[in-house]
């Protein structure tokens, strides 16, 4: 599919692995100019080299902890300069799903690792997008905001805040030609979940190719209609579409991509 993104410029925060890397890969393969930003310098550099080598596209790496507002604003500015402008921004970076402590500390940890990185990136990008005549914003929530439970209370609450924040950006900035949509993934077999497949298979004596699928139902109680976890490229393709002109009349949406989980 031609996403009509050739020559367009995108910043992917969390772009060194998982869903962010998958999104950057689709965009680069379609001829877009891409900046990827993530915490780990070596992994980010390696991802940029692999993407540019595989597609021939311009892919620029930046090291960023998006929990730091000032650092985020500086990286967004640098990415815009490196790309010669910006047409869209995607935020996939986030903290853990279970707070390490209880009480106020748990809430503050999730506030700082789940909500504020998205706010920092999007707030920093808005002025550039307005100056360029509009653009696209894609954020990452979670399917569990529609199926909350106590184990991930803080995580789900702050992921809900990401969805609300994104909806508000869509309503307030549509007049400037800015579209904002929120993707809510279910269980996606990113690097950490893929590593868990081998651990579960070895510890429980389950066939490797069935390990995640069985633990999702038996222990996590995730009744997934498609019977499997999602793959990063499946989310990346959705995010790239939302960033592209092909989704030109789609804004303010929260889109579940969860294989039909508890729906």
Image (cartoon, grey):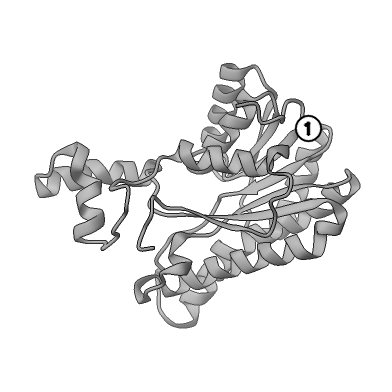
| Residue 115 spot, x, y in % from top left | 60, 65
Q: In the rendered view of the protein, which quadrant contains the C terminus?
A: bottom left
How dense is the environment of label 1, judged by Cα within 10 Å: few (below 14), some, or many (20 and up)?
many
Left or right, 152 with reference to 224: right
Judging depth in this view, the residue of 21 and 37 nearest the camera is: 21
Q: Is residue 71 visible?
A: no
Provide residue 43's location: percent of width, then percent of height: 51, 34
Look at the picture and state if 108 lies above or below 117. below
Q: Residue furthest bottom?
A: 103
Q: Position of residue 59 (x, y in %)?
A: 66, 28
Q: Quadrant of residue 58?
A: top right
Quadrant where the image shows the N terminus: top right
The residue under the point 40% across, 40% down is 231
Element on which disc 1 rests = helix
Specify the quadrant of the image occupied by residue 232. top left
Farthest-out residue, left? 205
Q: Position of residue 168 (x, y in %)?
A: 72, 67
The residue that mark 1 highlights is 83
Would residue 131 appear left or right of 184 to someone viewing this image? right
Residue, x 74% and y 62% (percent of image)? Answer: 169
């Amino acid at each position: 599919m031609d996403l009509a993104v050739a020559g367009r410029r995108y910043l992917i925060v969390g772009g060194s692995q998982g869903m962010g890397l998958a999104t950057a890969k689709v965009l680069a393969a379609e001829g877009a100019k891409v900046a990827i930003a993530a915490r780990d310098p070596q992994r980010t550099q390696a991802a940029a080299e692999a993407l540019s080598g595989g597609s021939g596209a311009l892919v620029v790496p930046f090291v960023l902890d998006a929990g730091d507002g000032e650092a985020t604003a500086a990286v967004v500015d640098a990415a815009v300069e490196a790309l010669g402008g910006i047409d869209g921004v995607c935020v996939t970076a986030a903290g853990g799903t279970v707070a390490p402590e209880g009480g106020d500390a748990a809430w503050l940890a999730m506030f700082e690792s789940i909500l504020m990185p998205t706010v920092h990136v999007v707030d920093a990008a808005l002025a550039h997008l307005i100056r360029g005549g509009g653009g696209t914003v894609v954020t990452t929530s979670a399917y569990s905001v529609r199926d909350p439970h106590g184990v991930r209370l803080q995580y789900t609450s702050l992921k809900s805040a990401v969805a609300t924040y994104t909806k508000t950006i869509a309503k307030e900035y549509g007049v400037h030609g800015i579209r904002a949509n929120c993707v809510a993934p279910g269980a996606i077999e990113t690097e950490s979940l893929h590593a868990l497949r081998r651990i579960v298979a070895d510890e429980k004596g389950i066939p490797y190719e069935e390990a995640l699928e069985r633990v999702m139902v038996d222990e996590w109680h995730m009744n997934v209609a498609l019977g499997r976890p999602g793959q990063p490229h499946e989310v990346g393709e959705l995010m790239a579409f939302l960033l592209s002109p092909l989704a030109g009349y789609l804004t303010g949406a929260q889109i579940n991509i969860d294989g039909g989980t508890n729906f």
